[in-house]
Amino acid sequence: MSSRHSLFGPLEDVAADAGHTDPPPRVGFFTDTSICIGCKACEVACKEWNLVPDDGFNVLGMSFDNTGMLGADSWRHVAFVEQALPLGGQNPGLSGLPIGPSGSEEQAEVAAAGLRHDERGGGELGTGPVDLGMPSFQRPGDTGGAEGRTDFRWLMMSDVCKHCTHAGCLDVCPTGALFRTEFGTVVVQQDICNGCGYCVSGCPFGVIDRRHGDGRAQKCTLCYDRLRDGMEPACAKACPTDSIQFGPLDELRERARLRVEQLHEDGVTEARLYGDDPHDGVGGSGAFFLLLDDPEVYGLPPDPVVPTRDLGTMWKYAGMAAGVLAAAAVSAFAGGRGR
Amino acid sequence: MGSNMAECHPVGFQWVTEAKARGAKVFHIDPRFTRTSALADRHVPLRAGTDIAFLGGVINYILSHDLDFREYVLAYTNASFIVREDYRDAEDLDGLFSGYDPETASYDPTTWQYENTEPTSRDSARPQEHKEEAAAYEHGAHGPEVKGAAGNIATDPTLQHPRCVYQILKRHYARYTPEMVEEVCGTPKEHFLRVCEVWTANSGRERTSAVVYSVGWTQHSTGSQYIRAASIVQLLLGNIGRPGGGVFALRGHASIQGSTDIPTLFNLLPGYLPMPSASTTPDLASYIEHIRADGQKGFWHHADAYIVSLLKEYWGDAATPENDFCFDYLPRIDGDHGTYRTVMDMIDGKVFGYFLLGQNPAVGSAHGKLQRLGMANLDWMVVRDLVMIESATFWKDSPEVETGEIVPEHCRTEVFFFPAASHVEKEGTFTQTQRMLQWREKAVDPVGDQRSDLWFFHQLGLRLKERLAGSTDERDRPLLDLAWDYATHDGDEPSADDVLRHINGHDLTTGRVVDSYLDLKADGTTSCGCWIYSGVYADGVNQAARRKPRREQNLYALEWGWVWPLNRRVLYNRASADLQGRPWSERKALVWWDEERGEWTGHDVPDFEPRKPPGYVPPPGATGPSALHGDDPFIMQADGKGWLFAPAGLLDGPLPTHYEPHESPVRNPLYGQQGNPTRRVYGRLDNPSNPAPPEPHSEVFPYVLTTARLTEHHTAGGMSRWVPYLSELQPYLFVEVSPELARARGLEHMGWAHVVTSRTAVDARVMVTDRMKPLRVQDRVIHQIWLPYHWGGSGLVDGDVVNDLFGVALEPNVFIQETKVTTCDVRPGRRPRGRELLDYVTRYRERAGITLETGTRVATTDGLGGVSHTEPTKGPDGPRRPEEDA
């Protein structure tokens, strides 16, 4: 094991850090939301391959999204965001029409009310609902106001487990059910998980979740079984437009950088990467995204932080506190003796 | 336009995203902002059912700004051809063309001819019969007959002659101005003009533009003319037969293209050979004569080889020159036997049995109630499907059981349900939208009693033959003489590979497969199941199974699958080269004339006789392929040219003309003629129409309704509503409304509403979305609403049948139903149920003054004084007869 700690910050080789000898290159997903057509083939392919059950025929009314969020029974989730806002060089064809104010706020409120009472996302553990900036929570000025709406955009984005460099779920797992694979991904071993749920509160993205009626934690495995057979994950395989790209993380990051440059040249100045930075709160994600607005718009946390980042500080403070306590105790005795 | 490609053809849409990444601009012109619009550079809204007005506006823009690709237009289209003196345009006759007969609501196209050509006798002599048989559809893969088109047609290369096609076009579309487009379509002028600018700027020698459409264009009472209008734009701009150009018809399912090539249609035989008609094609000679009119150009001249080889394939040794190769065994058509007519005939007690294969008309066809009432009045019905669809259980759980219109105890239809094997459980081919056949291996064995359709029909044939064995009845000969000689494997499963060989065709003298349709003979020495597919087994190799990766071959990937005809990827690609056979530009090179080798060559398989030089002029009197000049790229057309003006072949006019939909809230601002004057209406008590101007009370149904599919479901739901992973993604029927309409009608997001037409009312959850937006049409605000139509009463997720809202009004050329646009009302709350629903809809009909005649006076140039096209019916529930109104 390297001398450096692995609690936060950049990490050269996650698999080696986890003890794998001579691991293959770290792999991951680059999800380019600028070409996502919201077909949900990823959701279906994931469930088919991994035998994930349906999560009920819920009517959310959140645009075309009836999945709502990632959870034990949804390892891929396609978010649909309808907003009265402009997008890049796109012309939504609204000018000159006899139109009034936007209705997306009403839509969002109804959807938010439904989601707020949803048990998924670890709600029963007291970890939800947290305002992650779901699309349902409009920011001031988001809509077109009382006068006619002038802009519109329909964003789609396929969300998934981030397979963090420093994975909160893995780090807090007391049983060792969660482990780092040789590919640098994070996987739950179902036969070991005891359903304690620590991982649920340990994930800064709200990804991992316990399955209802079973209790064990579930999330994307990045199709560990397929990887071992040299195949790409089911969702990436099924994605018709290559919005979901799979490959060695280094290559994906380079490809993503070029794609952002191209979009900027094409006038889509909002394009930015999310989760690609090794210096972020989770040491960079194995699954990162090209977004067309702030992460909050898609229901992603703007500044996710792995709980272990503060571990050192916490122990330091705890140590200091203990030291102070000890000193106080010692001085108390010492003082007593001196009387 | 007319396509929601990202949602309905997501796999094909990857190439749009790829083109976009290379700099292509994507414009989505559609009534709705869809997932396609979300990825387009620009969404251009328009009112459903007005695309011809929009495209006519583009034609007018091109012609009035002289933006056509003149060299291409002059050489490769019929722009310079002169039309008969007695032709009258829609401009002269208030929306009608010359030759209209109001009694039969059909045209005699004689006056639409070129100055020195004639229509075939069938076209002109019996327009009504022609209409009954949807004869235009028989021209599916080729141009219609024009007698004498191989001769010298009178032309004016200066395009100045007042009767040349170019000038006729110019006059016809002169009033389709940007202002008129705005008035008809509701598309603000700036959006329309932007489309015109970009489309024309991106066409010509160096650049090409492509048009993509789907059923958003076809499912209209003027559907064929929508596509014609796009073809005119593309021909004027030089975008046909060239790389990156074209008019792309995206087919609705994996092999819908295949099911028109080898058709399941009443008026076609394989390879777009017409079905013989009882009156006009009594024998083989007259049949062949009918296909290849005298003295015309093109490859239909060899129709005798195609039909004789087909008959040899069907009846083998029994087919001899002496008995016309069993031509008399083929059924004859003697009128309208389309799917909707058939359903009405069921109701009227004229049809006794019905096979349903992979079709769920109780949910998927227009006027679901009519479908179910028809199916409830049969002796027997066979349903082959993956799951127990609504069309198999209508007798016990349809909406009509709730209303009391079908009583399970009394329903006489005996339903036989056969579980079918799915596409992964059997081998075969898919023919996709590019005419490409791709071989498919069986992935898993079917479970239980599930069997392939191939097995079912093979067995049906064998067992019928066995049952009839020894019969001396003449009428049993066609079945008894059927060759039916398909190899089997895995027991009694017919070999799809062997069927494909039969489709490809054999040389019967050697027993070997033929290499192409050029090898087919009319003397009975060859057999071929579908001449356009001939070549799919060339060299004895299953060409459809080829899978050479694209990186190992050129851009056209000629060794991936096989495309009919003869593996040509771009049809009419001779047009990609100029008159001298050189590519119009290096950037857009596709095929060209190699002077040294004396043949056509290029990146694609040339769609032209390989050794005919570009400057070739045929000798006088030549007909068929030999009459094609070296600069006649449209080799299947009677005159070798792309048709801006159609002198024959269409039943509703030589030029696309804007007509309002059958059910429309507004008057046609362009002509006194409101709707398509030749559309097929069925004026029956069980098929009421919503009133449309000039009829009064259209305001009772003030909103425009359009329907479509979602990515998450498959058409009538048989393949998705029983699958949990798909059902959970879109578990409920919803109606999309704009925020404006929601406010006007008091509709709340995710609350209930019901949509009403003169047929019924359906419940749906409300989806208030900015994607829907009202339009300004003729100083009125027009609201459009949209519903997906996947739900029915069965499955994991259920909902009302949206197609119950539609009546039956058909396009005259191909008999497609107008399900992309109608009018409706929408109200908050749920609809009444049971008998109360019938009363509720009756009250709507009364308010709208609907009678048997409503919607059936198709000619409106004289207001409502025209002929009404009704037929006697005894519908259990329909509009009142007019006399009852008194």
Image (cartoon, rainbow, N blue to C red):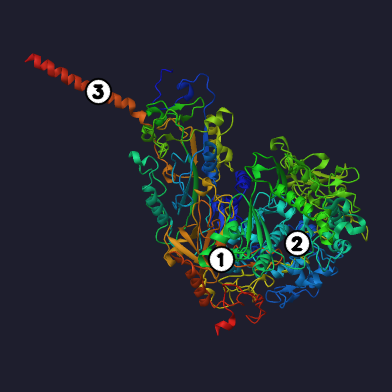
Residue A176 visible in the displayed image: yes
Label 3 environment density (alpha carbons within 10 Å; few <14, some 14–19, many ≥20):
few
Q: Is residue B813 above or below residue A119?
A: below
Q: Chain of mark 2?
A: B
Q: Nearer the viewer, residue B572 or A237?
A: A237
Residue B95: x %, y % from top left: 68, 74
Residue at the disc numbered 1: B406
Residue B680: x %, y % from top left: 68, 70
Residue A126 is labelled as none
- In contact (CB < 8 Å): disc 2 and disc 3: no
Measure how far apart labels 2 and 1 are at the Cα level. 32 Å
Amino acid identity at mark 2: Asn
* Residue at the outermost front position: B470
Residue A320 is labelled as 3
Q: Is residue B483 above or below residue B157?
A: above
Quarter of the figure with residue A327: top left
Relative to A185, is B375 on the left or the right?
Answer: right
Amino acid identity at mark 1: Ile
